[in-house]
Amino acid sequence: MPRPPSARNTGRIDLSARDINLPGVLEMGSYHYKTAQRELREVAHAGCFGICHLMRGVQTYRVGAEICHLRGGDQLLTFPGDVLDTAGTPEEKGHLFWLVLRMQPLDAPLLFLEQEAALELRTILLALPHRHFTAHPDATDLAATILNIAQSRPTQMQERLAAAQLVMRYLFQMLEAVGKDEANRPSSRIQRCLDHIAAHLDEPLAVPDLAALIGLSESRFKNRFRNEVGAPPGDYVLRSKIKSAGTALAQPKSTVTAVAHAHGFSSSQYFATVFRRFTGITPTAYREKHLPH
């Protein structure tokens, strides 16, 4: 699962099989990044099944040739043989939990289940029809509880059995979410707002104005937007501007100042600050990297 090459790992937890001390659980962890990190290069766990659970933010992942755009509340599965990266994009600021289970051999110990039950669970997981879907509503709180227990490095059998039971519950919630295939589209009201943002990236796009556009109070708009899109509206606006600005910066005749003003930023200095927060590099460095040679 995600292993950024950057050494700036504040807000990051990595737990190995020895730390977790549960049969069949190879790895577990989370990150809570306040700024973008460098891109994630190819990661693979041979013979394993992985779950990436994006609790907050947005993130692009590539699994093989498939590009998956995650938003807060989504889960992404990796199967044995899969190679995961961020398709050349940075690891975005946000909050992510991951869990890796060993799949081979199929009858190896797993979460203290009897051999037949362990085989059946692995068979079910490997046959799942979807790899990207909306998580169960309770999955975020449960993941946080599991991680807290695992960080205590349980050694007593009673503690280990309790932790294994919670992991099983997390897996069953995931199976329920896959069964419902809850990859929901935003409502027509919020989609209207998204379309407006996309068409007016050269404007300030203040949150109160966006709320008024679709006839909601500011507080209700913020809650509804976050629930349906997976990110706060102000954050989504800035991210959309930076994505568009990145495309503009790659044009030979562009300048940082012109691109900043064309995307509604009051100054190139503020633009550079926001750009670096979302991409991990300055607009000038990004332009030099992406200009055709």
Image: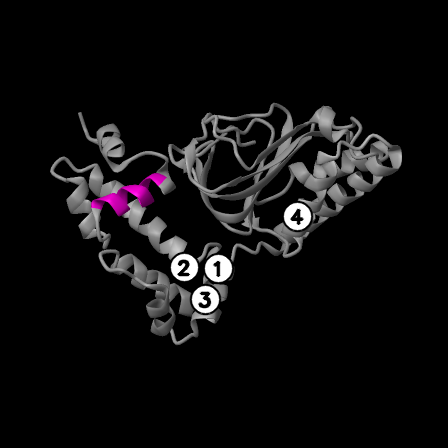
Local crowd size for mark 2, using a 10 Å CA cut-off: few (<14), some (14–19), many (≥20): many
Q: Is residue 76 magenta?
A: no
Query: Which of the two labelled residues, at mark 2 and mark 4, occupies the earlier sequence position?
Result: 4
Query: Which of the two labelled residues, at mark 4 and mark 3, occupies the earlier sequence position?
Result: 4
Q: Is residue 134 above or below residue 68?
A: below
Query: Which of the two labelled residues, at mark 1 and mark 4, occupies the earlier sequence position?
Result: 4
Segment tinted magenta in the rendering: 268-276
Query: Which of the two labelled residues, at mark 1 and mark 2, occupies the earlier sequence position?
Result: 1
- Whole-Å distance between the Cαs marked 4 and 3? 24 Å
Residue type, numbered disc 2: Pro
Given residues 29 and 75, the one toward you in this image is 29
Local crowd size for mark 3, using a 10 Å CA cut-off: few (<14), some (14–19), many (≥20): few
Q: Is residue 272 magenta?
A: yes
Residue 226's tag is 1
User: What residue is disc 4 on?
Assistant: 174
Residue type, numbered disc 1: Arg
- Whole-Å distance between the Cαs marked 1 and 4? 21 Å
User: What residue is disc 2 on?
Assistant: 233
Query: Which of the two labelled residues, at mark 3 and mark 2, occupies the earlier sequence position?
Result: 3
Q: Position of residue 262 (x, y in %)?
A: 18, 51
